[in-house]
């Protein structure tokens, strides 16, 4: 059984597709559409597709939180650059924290903050 959030569970062997909810649809417990064999409509899960995949034993297929954080950092940088207001201190701090989480150097990241 895989927890989908808010008391919803599904058998891992019956889940055949996960779809990330994006844009205005996302939020308030709406993270992922889960397509389950035998159910015509997708269930809405409050958990991310990566978390669901890891619970299903698909660690290699799951996108780690580091990638999500890196993409968020890149999006924030691009938006700030377009507006002409890049905060290099904040950018450096976030980048060090992200790098530390991927290389296991958490102590170096905390010391740099």
Image (spheres, rainbow, N blue to C red):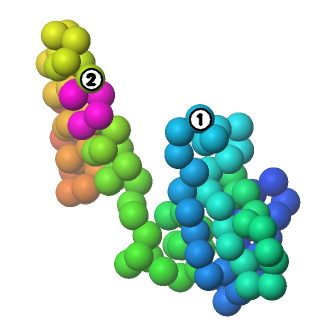
Quarter holding the N terminus is bottom right
- Tell me which residue sits at (68%, 73%) in the image: 35
Q: Does 109 appear in magenta?
A: no
Residue 24, x across and y down, in percent: 59, 35
Pick the front one: 74 or 102: 74
**Residue 79 badge:** 2
Magenta span: 74-78
Q: Secondary structure at mark 2?
A: helix
Q: Is residue 105 left or right of residue 13?
A: left
- Tell me which residue sits at (39%, 60%) in the image: 64
Residue 34, x across and y down, in percent: 67, 67
- Tell me which residue sits at (23%, 47%) in the image: 100
Pick the front one: 96 or 6: 6
Q: Is any part of residue 69 visible from this angle?
A: yes
Q: Does 75 appear in magenta?
A: yes
Nearer the N terminus, badge 1 or badge 2? 1
- Disc 1 target residue: 24
């Amino acid at each position: 059984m895989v927890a989908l959030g808010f008391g919803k569970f599904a058998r891992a062997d019956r889940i055949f597709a996960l779809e990330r909810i994006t844009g205005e649809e996302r939020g308030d417990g709406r993270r992922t559409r889960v397509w389950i064999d035998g159910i015509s409509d997708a269930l809405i899960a409050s958990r991310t597709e990566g978390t669901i995949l890891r619970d299903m034993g698909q660690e290699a297929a799951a996108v780690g939180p580091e990638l999500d954080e890196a993409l968020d950092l890149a999006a924030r940088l691009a938006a700030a650059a377009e507006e002409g207001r890049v905060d290099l201190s904040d950018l450096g701090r976030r980048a060090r924290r992200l790098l530390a989480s991927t290389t296991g150097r958490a102590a170096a990241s905390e010391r740099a903050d």
